Amino acid sequence: MDTSTLVYCAMALAAGCFVQSTVGFGMAIVAAPIVYFFEPRFVPGTITLVGLVLALINMWQYRSQVSFRGLGAAFVGRVPGTIVAGGLLLYITAESLALVLGAGVLLAVVISLLKVRIRPTPKALFWAGFASGLMGTSTAIGGPPMALVLQHAEAGKLRANLAGYFTFSSILSLLALTATGHFSWWHFKYGMMIMPAPILASLFAYRIQHLIRAEWLRYALLVLCSVSGVIAIWQGMAPKFV
């Protein structure tokens, strides 16, 4: 593989990891379109591997604030959400499902801006995990539902619990990708080659995260959720214009 391709992909993933380490999620939103442009074979397998390492690093950095008990309901919801999405895709197209889910995310953002507060109860976390499974399976961006439920949490707890959730979901995704032939030694090898840049970006973000105000963090979350919703709608609408 051309060295410049690896460098560009590493830079894109570093930028995505910096955003996710600062805000709590968003690596795939920032990096995936750029990585796909330079090396489509890195999506989704190599990006998912980087996402797993990033989640593990972030979870370790904020380990004192991770609440696995609180995340249990989200873990439980993620599995049936993924299964239901797989079943739905047997009857409807991925584009149709992405369109509906993208509109749902934008609606949730609007509700959040209207000062409606969603408390992170076990029931809310279960349905957030379920919606994340649906969205992650159809659009490869599963963070927004969890981010919207946890948006009012203290910054460290927000980052910690999103990292814990992404660790679980990334492992599930890698197992599924391996079983279906979409993740192999090739993806792992090149993932390890570009890994230093994302790791350094994550460590740098950890050094400066204390400078970010809580209100900035919440609005950054809502912006990223809005971007993911627009991307999902675009994925749903694009085939109609081709």
Image (cartoon, rainbow, N blue to C red):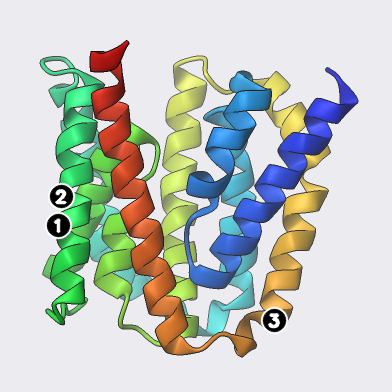
Which image quarter is the C terminus in? top left
Left or right of residue 69, residue 197 in this image:
right
Q: CA distance from mark 1 to mark 2?
A: 5 Å
> Can you see residue 18?
yes
- Determine which quarter of the picture holds residue 153: bottom left
> What number of labels is visible?
3
Crowdedness of circle 1 by 10 Å Cα count: few (<14), some, many (20+)? some
Residue found 54% across the figure and 35% down from its top? 33
Q: Where is residue 1? Give x, y as percent.
A: 83, 17
Q: What residue is disc 2 on?
A: 104
Q: CA distance from mark 3 to mark 1?
A: 32 Å
Q: Are marks 1 and 2 in contact (CB under 8 Å)?
A: yes
Q: What residue is disc 3 on?
A: 208
N-terminal of the pair, mark 2 or mark 3, is 2
> Can you see residue 77?
no
Q: What residue is disc 1 on?
A: 107
Query: What SS does tag 1 mark?
Result: helix
